[in-house]
Image (tube, rainbow, N blue to C red):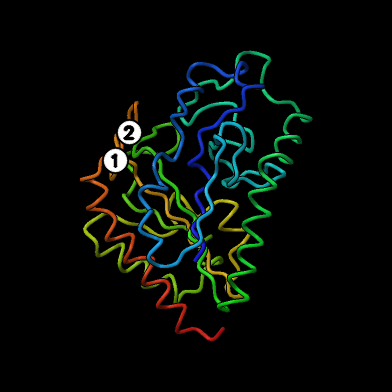
Amino acid sequence: MLLSIPHVGTHIPEVIRGDYTEVALQRADTDWHLDRLYAFAQQFGASVLRATHSRSVIDLNRPPDNQSLYPGRITTGLCPTETFRGEALYHPGRGPDAAETAQRLALYWRPYHDTLAAELERLKSLHGQVLLWDAHSIASQLPRLFEGKLPDLNLGTADGASCAAEVLSPVAAIAQGSGFSAVVDGRFKGGHITRHYGNPSQGVHAIQLELCQCLYMDEDKPFEYRSERAERLQPTLSAMLSGACDAMAALTP
């Protein structure tokens, strides 16, 4: 298992920090505390890859050519210029140009993906099958991006392309029977990581899980982790990961 957490980072390099607005420096769109929430994954012997830099510097879950993952819908790009709520991330005229974007790709985006790809190959050579679990979280209500409240657990597999049905089926069943609301390939179908690396015919089964942040933390600043909520959620997360691994073990490498 490879647990990827591409939006947990908060670092903004000092050299560009002055370009950002005060709103940007709050880092509200961070996938807060997911490394802490998923700490139990060590019991599975999982490899863990976590971002260090803020998604406002560069979004590791967007394609390098900045093509939209959801054509026709509002979404943020490779080097976002606004928050999920539509607030400006940069002072006027201070956003990244093409040269700055290329530099960020080389400095931050490429190393994450080179490491991810190498670790997938290493795990596949050892085990034949690999589960790539791309961990995300988001505020449960963002009217600019979606109507109403999101389901608690949003599984994405690029409409089934990134994960074998035999692996997804027990994960979905556990989520939908957990007491939390759950959906598969609804508003979130998986980002670039899920879509690019998921290749079940080659032994890589990629699943993105977008969690509502209210399940384990406060959604308003200072974005505190809430242990009592997290402890109610973690058994479901653990069961989903375990169910996926058990299903992969039954597949022919």
Determine whether the residue tagged by mark 1 lies in a helix, strand or loop: helix
Q: Looking at the rendering, which quadrant does residue 194 occupy?
A: bottom right
Q: Residue at x 48, y 61 (%)?
A: 207
Looking at the picture, how far across and down is residue 38, in whole percent? 38, 53
| Label pair 1/2, CB-CB below 8 angstroms | yes
Q: Looking at the rendering, which quadrant does residue 174 occupy?
A: bottom left
Q: Residue at x 63, y 69 (%)?
A: 122
Looking at the picture, how far across and down is residue 206, in whole percent? 52, 64
Looking at the picture, how far across and down is residue 54, in whole percent? 54, 34
Determine whether the residue tagged by mark 2 lies in a helix, strand or loop: loop
Q: Which residue is mark 1?
A: 214
Of residues 69 and 73, which is closer to you in this image?
A: 69
Q: Which residue is mark 2?
A: 219
Of residues 118 and 59, which is closer to you in this image?
A: 118
Q: Is residue 71 left or right of residue 241?
A: right
Q: How crowded is the residue under tag 2: few (<14 C-alpha within 10 Å), some, or many (20+)?
A: many
Q: Residue at x 53, y 60 (%)?
A: 158
All told, the count of numbered labels is 2
Q: Is residue 15 above or below residue 206?
A: above
Looking at the picture, how far across and down is residue 175, in whole percent? 31, 62
Residue 161 - label: none
Whichever of labels 1 and 2 marks the residue nearer the N terminus, that label is 1
Q: Residue at x 62, y 17 (%)?
A: 19
